Amino acid sequence: MTRMKLHKITPNLWFDSQAEEAANFYTSIFHDSKIGRIARYGPESRGVEGTVMTVEFQLEGQSFVALNGGPHFKFNEAISFIVHCDDQAELDYYWDKLSEGGDEKAQVCGWLKDPFGVSWQIIPSHLTEMICDPDPARAGRVMQAILQTKKKIDIKALHQAYDN
């Protein structure tokens, strides 16, 4: 059992019963990641005694908790995790890994849903700089390129729009 330093704010992800499976999935994708403590339901709890209640895990130094809370709540696009990528190869890697088994209909403009229904934005690290450029024409061309993106972002196409 690994005890991890918890951050001031830790995202808590509510799963029906796949918390451990999800934590293992995410830690298999992100290079600097690990599973921490796993708490199990006891005889006094609402869950099935002995089954996983929570899993602490880290992805790239960010702490998370996955909770098996039952089928009461589902993930939606109102919350997403952004993965900043330095180049197309890294963007492709995270896109391919996180989208595998996910909802293909939810793949648009760099957004995807993983197999657990969690939304992710897989974007170039410098995207914010491009869309916040003081030249409104440059920023506008980049936004247009993003809005025309069918699924994952093509960094070369964004640079072409930016430099045009």
Image: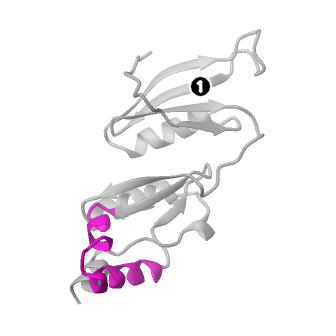
Asked if 60 appears above or below 91 in the picture, the reply is above
Q: Secondary structure at mark 1?
A: strand
- Spot the residue most to the bottom: 164
For this view, does 23 lie left or right of residue 143? Answer: right
Q: List x then y, in percent, for residue 31.
A: 32, 42
Q: Main secondary structure of the magenta part?
A: helix
Quarter of the rendering containing residue 124 = bottom left
In the displayed structure image, the side of residue 102 where residue 72 appears, left or right: right
Q: Position of residue 6 (x, y in %)?
A: 41, 24
Residue 21 drawn above or below residue 39 = below
- Find residue 162 and report its horizontal and vertical position in percent: 26, 82
| Quadrant (top left, top right, bottom left, bottom right) of the N terminus | top left
Specify the segment rendered in magenta.
124-149
Q: Quadrant of residue 69?
A: top right
Residue that label 1 marks: 54
Foreground of the two, 77 or 20: 77
Q: Which amino acid is tagged 1?
A: Thr
Which sits in the foreground, 47 or 77?
Answer: 77
Give the vertical position of 48 relative to 25 (above or below). above
Q: How far across and down, in percent of the image, does residue 16 sit?
A: 71, 38
Please give the name of the residue rendered at 30% of the width and 82% of the height, measured from the top-left corner. Answer: 136
> Is 112 part of what is drawn in magenta?
no
**Compared to 29, does 33 lie above or below?**
above
